[in-house]
Image (tube, coloured by chain):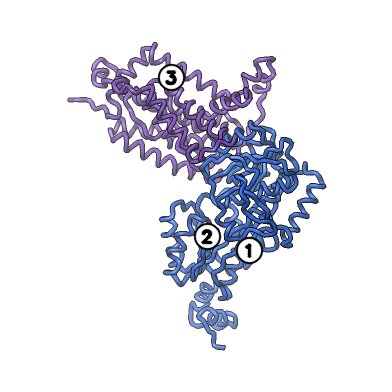
Chain colours: A purple, B blue
Amino acid sequence: MIDTILAIVTATVIAGTPLVYAALGELVTEKSGVLNLGVEGMMLVGAISGFITATVTGSVWLGILVAAIAGMAMALIFAVFAISLRTTQVATGLARSIVGAGLSSQLGRGYFGVAFVRPDSAVYDFFHGIPLIGPALTAFHPLVYLSWAIFAAIVWFFSRSRLGLVIKAIGEAPSSAHAIGFSVIGLRYAATLFGGAMAGIGGGYLALIYTSLWVENITAGRGWIAIALVVFATWKPERALLGAYLFGGVTTAQLFAQGAGMPVPSEFMSALPYIATVVVLVLISRDSSLIRLNAPASLGRPFQLEG
Amino acid sequence: MFNLTRRSFLQNAALTGVTVASGGVGIARADDLLKVGVVIQGPIADTGWNSFHDRAWKAMEAAMPGRIKATVIENINQPQDAERVFRQLAVQGHKLVLGTTFSQYATLRKMSPAISQAHFECCAGIETTSNLGVFEARSYEGTYLTGISAGRMTKSNILGWVGAYPVPQVNYNLSGFVLGARSVNPDVVCKVVWVNAWDDPAKEKDAVNALVAQGADVISGSPNTPVQGLACEEKGVWSIGSTGDFSKYVKKAQLTSFELDWSPAYIESAKGVIEGNWKPSARWRGIGPDGFVKMTTQNPALPPELVKELQEAEAAIVAGKLHPFAGPIKDNKGNEKVAAGTVMSDEALKGIDWLVEGVQG
């Protein structure tokens, strides 16, 4: 029983990690008042860029770095349109997702169904060899631990740092923030690029660590889940993290339940992660004034200097 | 006697060296060449469903060098796109047009009678029309044999199956697998996890992990990607490639595998069209000469007596002495589905909506 629970918990963290990256990135972007619906596309382009890099060079970390850069590049194109040229953010973001899906298929043509065999790592062997805590330290890929560090940094950033407050301010009242001398455009660019990098890493993790494989549309809708998580988490990082693991956890648990022979239709089981995540997050944020209070007031609205 | 068609006339003309007019030879050649259209649903990888069709059209071209030119169109995901592409191919003079998945069947069935100048074939389908033939593999013969390996090699007596959707093709594969396993080891049970997706490798991997955590030590399913095998390798359990040989990536864990070989279907159809005797047919074949199922890699870890047992079972299936779905067979709710002394009919198999005894979940 303990073994099963441990297996479920481990699988939950692994399954939730791409969502953690993508959702936290989108959260930061949205906090600055930019709604980027291109997460799915940024994840896909990140996934294939990282996958190709890692396959060619044999280095996972180089792959992840390129995945982040590719995600950022996608976000940069979005930012040029949506922030500088002030196009509709929703339409521009959707277009990014569609372009990302097509672009990743095109880039991945020679790599479809190819598996990436991760090289043995001396660092892994070293940490794994530490008595007692070694196996626990190496239960997850370092990217999982990195996601926790980034989560902690984001929580600190928005509650304790001056820059975090400024980002929040430009998401709430860009004109006021601009009036007292902050660069709304610049900071929105920065927040959007950060979101792109995080989505890229999420995609890279999915292709390189989680499955070690490239297939078209490998994200299978996870980018959209990440966007939904941010809204249901009422733009609070700790709730986004919870939501990501909840989604991963229910996905995993329903597979275990099926294996154990639970007499529930598998179609229902497959829908369960979506249902459970929505229900729980709606429950914890059932106070609608809370959503209004937390939603960045200028979310989705292009910033234009008056006068 | 005077069965003189334009093609045969021009063929003869070309053969005897008669040139009709300037450019006449060119016309003869163009007409002599059979243009075949192949519409593939997804991208082509080096393993999995689409790769089998990719190999088949290449085998078809190679079988009649210089006589056939294939036009292959890949990544046609939506049936409405497929219809447009099928029509276009037929209009452009492709006398033989092949659909490669069941999801294209409905489109072909609807449109084929109206386009009488072309001959259509669809891989997986129900009924033929005046110019649409269907072909499909008795892949349960393959899973029956891999099931024997699984039944012999399991230590926990728990097998695992990662299912895409509970459709008849998957149901008879899974049931065949369990029947094969239980034919040599009646204590075996098989846990099943449905991922409800054809292509979500991350979920497939989670499913393997869930099955292994619950004691399964030989995992099969209908993977289109190596992810199942790779997950098994990570966990140190056996993996079986049903309709896919992933030994290129899954170096240690792949116990055995089989693939689908559609080249006989392609070659026969093309030959029929060239010789003018093509007829719409429903071909459903398993292992054997000109069959659609080919057993592939076997792991060196298989004991020699098991290898022999597998060869004997394969020979018995080819000879028609062994039918995986020979009664008595119960479903996993305890109802008798196939009576002793009878064999499940093809009709019943093609619509199978139950799973055999021993399947859990």
Task: Give the position of the N terminus of chain A as an image quadrant.
Answer: top right
Task: Give the position of the C terminus of chain A as an image quadrant.
Answer: top left
Pointer 1 residue? B264
Placement of A153 over or under A276, stated as above or below? above
Residue type (three-letter) at the residue carrying disc 2: Gly
**Residue name at image x 35 percent, y 26 percent:** A30
In which quadrant of the rendered view does residue B269 lie?
bottom right
Relative image position of residue A282 (x, y in whole percent):
37, 26
The disc at residue B125 is 2
Closer to us: B358 or A232: B358
Residue type (three-letter) at the residue carrying disc 1: Pro
Pointer 3 residue? A238
**Does B20 sit left or right of A84 as displayed?**
right
- Secondary-structure class at tag 1: helix
- Crowd tier of the residue under label 1, counting other residues whose Cα lies within 10 Å: few below 14, some 14–19, many 20 or above: some
Q: Same chain, marks 2 and 3?
A: no
Which is more foreground, mark 3 or mark 1? 3
Q: Chain of mark 2?
A: B
- Crowd tier of the residue under label 3, counting other residues whose Cα lies within 10 Å: few below 14, some 14–19, many 20 or above: some
Q: Is residue A300 visible?
A: yes
- Distance CA(mark 2)–CA(mark 3): 51 Å
- Distance CA(mark 1)–CA(mark 2): 17 Å
Question: Which residue, as the protein is rendered here, is positioned at the far left?
Answer: A307
